[in-house]
Image (spheres, rainbow, N blue to C red):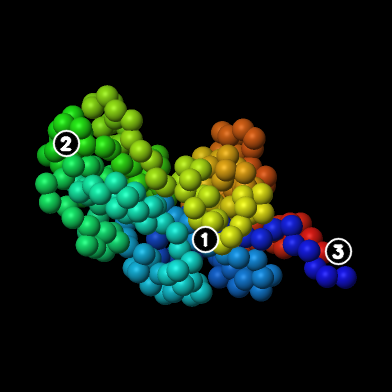
Amino acid sequence: MASRRALKAVLIDLSGTLHVEDTAVPGAQEALRRLRQASVAVKFVTNTTKECKRDLVERLRRLDFDVQEREIFSSLSAARSLLEQQQQRPLLLLEESALEDFSGVDTSEPNAVVVGLAPDHFNYQTLNEAFRLILDGAPLIAIHKGRYYRRKDGLALGPGPFVTGLEYAADCRATVVGKPEKTFFTQALSDLGCSPWEAVMIGDDVRDDVGGAQDAGMLGILVRTGKYRKGDEAKIAPPPHLTCPSFPEAVEHILKNLLLVE
């Protein structure tokens, strides 16, 4: 009998799921190799704004992950697409390492504000410049609104609190382009020619990764690495399809339970 796969694609978060900064999650490289051998489409979806896509690929390869740049769909890419569609000139609150992904974008006389994870720019002077632009009518674009993320030294504030502060001060609402927005997931899947009900998402953020994916019609698997905190699985409804210790166990579940053969 011919094989019939109920699952066509797996979307995988990066930071906190495959690695934490320059340390890989134990067993993640081999688990990824096993997943690729199952002939499902794999795409890496990330809200990371600390570095450009090229630097991110180099980091992953140093950790022995087999990843191609074309396989990564980032919130930076989604933000650039929005700016180009609307022909906007942004004030970019981004780290220097992420600016490569906006190469060629006109930033003279800004008429839009883009906020990513930019600790070096989250100071009064820069945030006040952004606030004044927004008061004058510039749209506020949040690459994502993550509350926090995992570093080697512990949890750290994400861009979400700073975006929310600008929303409050300027009495506006940001356009969010990254996870957990439904359009982010559907755009990533459209590149694979896959429908949401044919896909599963693996990530460490119960709201942005798992909740966002499930709201888009996918299955969501939460891993207890990265930013996970005890009780996270109870913070969304419906709860995750599965909560497991780490990425290798998530892959094992997919291979044993979601790939059907008749």
At label 1, the amino acid type is Asp
Q: Residue at x 18, y 29 (%)?
A: 135
Q: Residues within 10 Å of mark 2 (few under 14, many from 20)?
A: some
Q: Quadrant of the C terminus?
A: bottom right
The image quadrant of residue 211 is: top right
**Residue 191, numbered circle:** 1
The image quadrant of residue 49 is: bottom left
Q: Earlier in the sequence, mark 1 or mark 2?
A: 2
Expressed as whole percent of the image width and height from the top left, the position of residue 23 reads 44, 65
Please give left or right for residue 204 compared with residue 5 in the image: left
Residue 39 visible somewhere in the drawing: yes
Q: Quadrant of the N terminus?
A: bottom right
**Residue 76, numbered circle:** none
**Residue 262, numbered circle:** 3
Q: Earlier in the sequence, mark 3 or mark 1?
A: 1
Residue 122 visible somewhere in the drawing: no
Q: Label 2 belongs to which residue?
A: 133
Q: Residue at x 66, y 49 (%)?
A: 197
Pointer 1 and pointer 2: residues touching (CB < 8 Å)? no
Please give left or right for residue 205 compared with residue 76 in the image: right
At label 2, the amino acid type is Leu
